[in-house]
Amino acid sequence: MARNDNETSLPKALGDEELIILSTVAERIFPKTDTPGAVEIGAVNYIEIALAGDYAALAPLYRQGLRAIQRYCRIKFNKHFIDLAAAEQDAVLREFEAGAQDTFAQAAEFFETVRYHVLEGVFCEPQYGGNKDMTGWRLVDFPGQQFGYADAYINKRADLEPVSVDSTPPQEEGTTKWGFQRGRATPLVTSAVQTPLANSINYRKAEEK
């Protein structure tokens, strides 16, 4: 699923209207505050790439779910989802999260899939199309793929500039090629933050509680 030189040739899994709805949903899950939201960080771009590649089997669920959101909004509000107020959009998404509407039987599965993928896109390795400029990592002080540490970072936030897997390993005086102190091997950070987080419409609201 990583980006490559042929990325532009990948087929589009979603139509333009579906992408607009998805972007709006993503911004309600991880909204912009005083820091970037899901769209600016690249979560929707990550999902587009994933649905055209490794997550292709989930493209039908996305298309059906996004159309169901639009259909539900027309029935309940006589409006498009993107034209609703933020509170109304959240109410619609809560209905889908709970499976408490009768327009789409897979509503709860669809919402949880999108929520999970949005958070993947915010916190993934940048090579997969999301986490632009490692912004997601910076929000939580995640150091990324460090090539070694002068001191152990245990039970404290790492005050280090994040490093992606594509970054060139630094080499400083007194270290090996990969940044380890000579005679002292320090384990790498091996994975980005890609685990399910709070089961909530708005991840940031849940985080603040």
Image (spheres, rainbow, N blue to C red):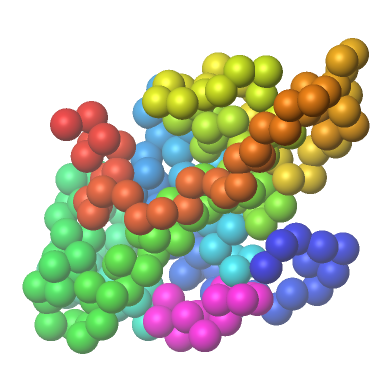
Q: Residue furthest left?
A: 100
* Horizontal and vertical percent position of residue 135: 57, 33
Examine the image and state in which quarter residue 189 appears.
Answer: top right
Q: Residue furthest front?
A: 183
Q: Nearer the viewer, residue 90 or 56?
A: 56
Residue at image position (37%, 44%) is 30
Residue 178 among those drawn in magenta? no
* Horizontal and vertical percent position of residue 104: 23, 83
Q: Residue furthest top?
A: 173
Q: Is residue 191 left or right of residue 103?
A: right
Q: Nearer the viewer, residue 172 or 209?
A: 172
What are the residue bounds of the magenta stretch?
A: 51-63
Q: Is residue 48 left or right of residue 84?
A: right
Residue 57 among those drawn in magenta? yes
- Answer yes or no: is residue 105 visible: yes
* Horizontal and vertical percent position of residue 195: 41, 54
* Horizontal and vertical percent position of residue 9: 80, 73
Q: Is residue 68 above or below residue 197?
A: below
- Answer yes or no: is residue 170 visible: no
Residue at image position (23%, 73%) is 108
